[in-house]
Amino acid sequence: MHINNRHKQGYNFKNLLKVSPELSPFIIKNKYNNQDTIDFSNPLAVKSLNAALLKSEYRINFWDIPEGYLCPAVPGRVDYIHHLNDLLVNTSIDVLSKNSVINALDIGTGASCIYPLLGQREYNWSFVASDIDPISINVAQSIIASDNTLTQKIQCRLQINTHHIFTNIIKENDFFHLTLCNPPFHSSLNEATHGTNRKWKNLNKTKISSSPQKGALNFGGQKAELWCPGGELAFIEKMIIESKIFQKQVLWFTCLVSKKDNLGKIKLYLKKAKVKQVKVVNMTQGQKISRFIAWSFYDMPSL
């Protein structure tokens, strides 16, 4: 994990229980019976752990999401935030010195609003949190409204046109230092279901029904969180094409890329869009390697 990640030494369940006693019923011993953990296949346990982490480490006293919405793992999500900060720190350009507050745009914030919450708490960034799902926006707004410091730093915007990503969200006078996104990476409901089944098999669980109304799909997220026509590659291609419209209003566009094999095509899309800068940043969490791609239409001689 990133050197600044608060969770790189694992979870301190003793401290978590002090601030969040409701986590207690979900704590179990690992298979060696010598260390506390939770059952990560239990969505209620994962949600309770997230709420405890946000309360203990990030001063988020109220956080709740509806059943069936994506419940993100805090350590991995905050790693993205830390690496984005590194990206800014290593960017030498006048626009950074002219703005004392970093403005970020989260595409597909989800009901959890996890990236704006973590980015605000870790680096005091200001956020616009966008989503195409009205329920996600309403839930995110309820989380934000519970804390006056959050209401001053995070605003939500509903994307009213599902064919757009930045259009309707980026306003005429907006400027963002960063955009970030965890895109839907499956290309169909069937593919999303198979992906969820694999995760459950890894957790030693039995295979679930393919119905989106049952079992682990509700643990895994809603349709817009999991899949879109063409999957991750098509979504990022659309994002790159649309980013050209707002090239002077955003310093760094960024997006997670779950499939390493997609990077070649994504770089071709970026070349076609005539971007000035491209960076691929790898992130490591245990045995897992993830990555995001960043691009900019600004000239940056120092890079």
Image (cartoon, rainbow, N blue to C red):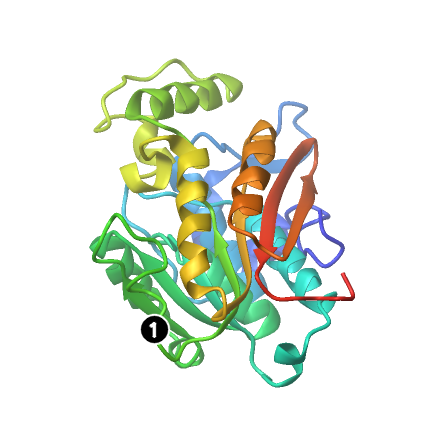
Residue on which the image places disc 1: 171
From the viewer's side, name the closer residue of 157 and 33: 157
Left or right placement of residue 95 versus residue 150 in this view: right
Q: Specify the farthest residue to the top.
A: 206
From the viewer's side, name the closer residue of 244 and 163: 244
Q: Which residue is at a point 60% across and 71% down the rendered structure image?
A: 123
Q: Where is residue 129 in the image (x, y as percent from the top left)?
A: 38, 63
Q: Position of residue 18 (x, y in %)?
A: 55, 60
Q: Which residue is at a point 65% across and 59% down the rendered structure image?
A: 82
Task: Identify the image quadrant of residue 16.
Answer: bottom right
Counting other residues with Cα less than 10 Å from the Cα at mark 1, is it few (<14), some (14-19), or many (20 or more)?
few
Q: Where is residue 66 in the image (x, y as percent from the top left)?
A: 27, 48
* Number of dots carrying numbers: 1
- The amino acid pointed to by label 1 is Lys
Q: Is residue 43 above or below residue 100?
A: above
From the viewer's side, name the closer residue of 170 and 102: 170
Q: Which residue is at a point 52% across and 49% down the rendered structure image?
A: 255
Task: Identify the image quadrant of residue 43.
Answer: top left
